[in-house]
Image (cartoon, helix red, strand yellow):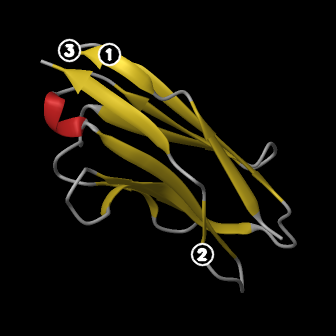
Amino acid sequence: QVQLMESGGGLVQTGESLKLSCAVSGLSSSIDAIGWSRQAAGKEREFVANIHTVVGTTYADSVRGRFFAFRDDAKNTVDLQMNSLKPEDTAVYYCWVLPVGGRTSWGRGTQVTVSP
């Protein structure tokens, strides 16, 4: 069973930085894609960043240039470096993984709160 564990969330002020980490365990095949999504209170979950083995890294327009995703296949981890945080970045952040030939699995999420 694939399991994902996020860490690194917290409360920061506008303009500060935060780094999220996600560790994946239980994989029976290599990773096709891995990334992050987020869900703000009262809103639908939205895409943040995606690292695909072939396509490379893509970002949502709202975070491009501020957020940077890093993937380490040797450790089965994905990090999200978030810079110049804004109050609108406040959300629960989820990591997810799509194994080759498998289905997407999600972590439980970690709260990020950015105060004005």
Q: Is residue 82 positioned above or below 45 on the image?
A: above
Q: Please give the name of the residue rendered at 24% of the width and 51% of the height, measured from the top-left corner.
A: 41
Rendering coords of residue 31 (x, y %): 70, 66
Q: Please give the name of the residue rendered at 46% of the width and 67% of the height, measured from the top-left corner.
A: 55
Q: Amino acid at mark 3?
A: Gly
User: Residue 96 shows which numbered tag?
Assistant: none
In the shown orientation, is residue 15 left or right of residue 39? left
Q: Residues within 10 Å of mark 3 (few under 14, many from 20)?
A: some
In the shown orientation, is residue 69 left or right of residue 99? left
Q: Please give the name of the residue rendered at 51% of the width and 32% of the height, measured from the top-left corner.
A: 20
| Residue toward you, 22 or 58 | 22
Distance from disc 1 to disc 2, alpha carbons, whole Å, reads 30 Å
User: Residue 104 shows which numbered tag?
Assistant: 2
Q: Amino acid at mark 1?
A: Val
Q: Is residue 45 positioned above or below 39 on the image?
A: below
In which quadrant is the N terminus drawn? bottom right
Residue designated by label 1? 12
Rendering coords of residue 5 (x, y %): 68, 46
Give the quadrant of residue 75. top right
Of mark 2 and mark 3, the one earlier in the sequence is 3
Q: Amino acid at mark 2?
A: Thr
Residue designated by label 3? 15
| Residue toward you, 29 or 41 | 41
Q: Is residue 65 positioned above or below 36 on the image?
A: above
Furthest-bottom residue in view? Answer: 101
Q: Residues within 10 Å of mark 1 (few under 14, many from 20)?
A: some
